[in-house]
Amino acid sequence: MQERTRKRSRGPLIIIGGGEDKEGERTILREVARHVNGGKLVLATVASHEPEGYFEAYQKAFADLGVTDLVEIYVKDRAETLDPEKLRLFDGAAGVFFSGGDQLRISSQIGDTPIEQRVREIHDRGGLLAGTSAGASVMSETMLVKGTSGESYKIGDLHMAPGLGLVRNVIIDQHFAERGRFGRLFGAVAHNPRELGIGIDEDTALVLENEQFQVIGSGCVYVVDGAGVTHSNIAEAEPERSLCMYDIRMHVLSSGDAFDLAKRRPAEVPDLQKSHAIEAQAAS
């Protein structure tokens, strides 16, 4: 009898809003360590223009969490992604952790290179991929590059670019409540209403496995859903005009809450018809 072979599932994603605790309880870094389970972790500092100090800070933070085999990968330009010495850093790795900086540096310097291929190989065989701040934004297919924080979104004030596409049908923003980024995430969703907008506070992360994520950390995760929007001025208004959208839906999740990306709903809650019924009752 021929033995059946199972297709190995991809590893988890830990997507962090930045500013994760490195000295106290270190809830998020503990979760990273749990998934690495004593194996090698590659710290990719590619997002930074000046990476000095990142490795030492994470080495100290991980020291007593069981992550003792920590190595750093950094490239100044795309040519270095061909360096065999750098590629060998990924040998036997249980996970890759993208640190903060400029997300455009990650996508432009390692996108479609042997380094990206090694990262994907680790993920495809069940390894962990984690990213904080810029390292979080780059995980989506479409990533926010820049846009005004702390004020209403102006239609011409948003820059997006292709990310690494490790998670599909979402746009991720970070340092969310701390930097007042609600307006620019609404703007991103107005441009791409089929994609969920996900804003992640500092010291907060979502742990994504099999189309469902759970929130960990001290802050909140905000999920903006534009699928039911009935009106938007995104295509007609002048660039300096403020955005308007009707019937946008938003979920606010905190530690322990879960969300199903496929269903576009928090896990284990009443279906959308219940919400519509409550709205109808309030309007009557």
Image (cartoon, grey):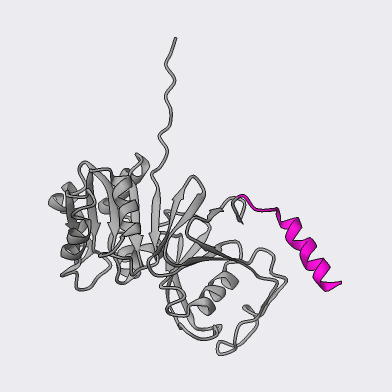
Question: Which quadrant is home to the C terminus?
Answer: bottom right
63 to the left or right of 187 = left
Query: Is 116 drawn above or below residue 247 in the view shown?
Result: above
Query: Is 265 drawn above or below residue 226 in the view shown?
Result: above
> Residue drawn 42% across and 38% down?
9
Q: Which residues are magenta?
A: 268-284
Query: Can residue 251 be spotted in the picture?
Result: yes
Residue 252 position, x and y percent, is 56, 66
Residue furthest toward the top? Answer: 1
Q: Dominant secondary structure of the magenta stretch?
A: helix
Q: Nearer the viewer, residue 170 or 268?
A: 268
Residue 116 position, x and y percent, is 30, 53
155 to the left or right of 123 = right
Residue furthest toward the bottom? Answer: 240
Displayed quadrant of residue 202: bottom left
Query: Is 172 drawn above or below residue 235 in the view shown?
Result: above
Q: In the image, is residue 114 part of the stretch drawn in magenta?
A: no
Residue 190 position, x and y percent, is 60, 72
Residue 71 position, x and y percent, is 17, 54
> Residue drawn 54% across and 83% down?
153
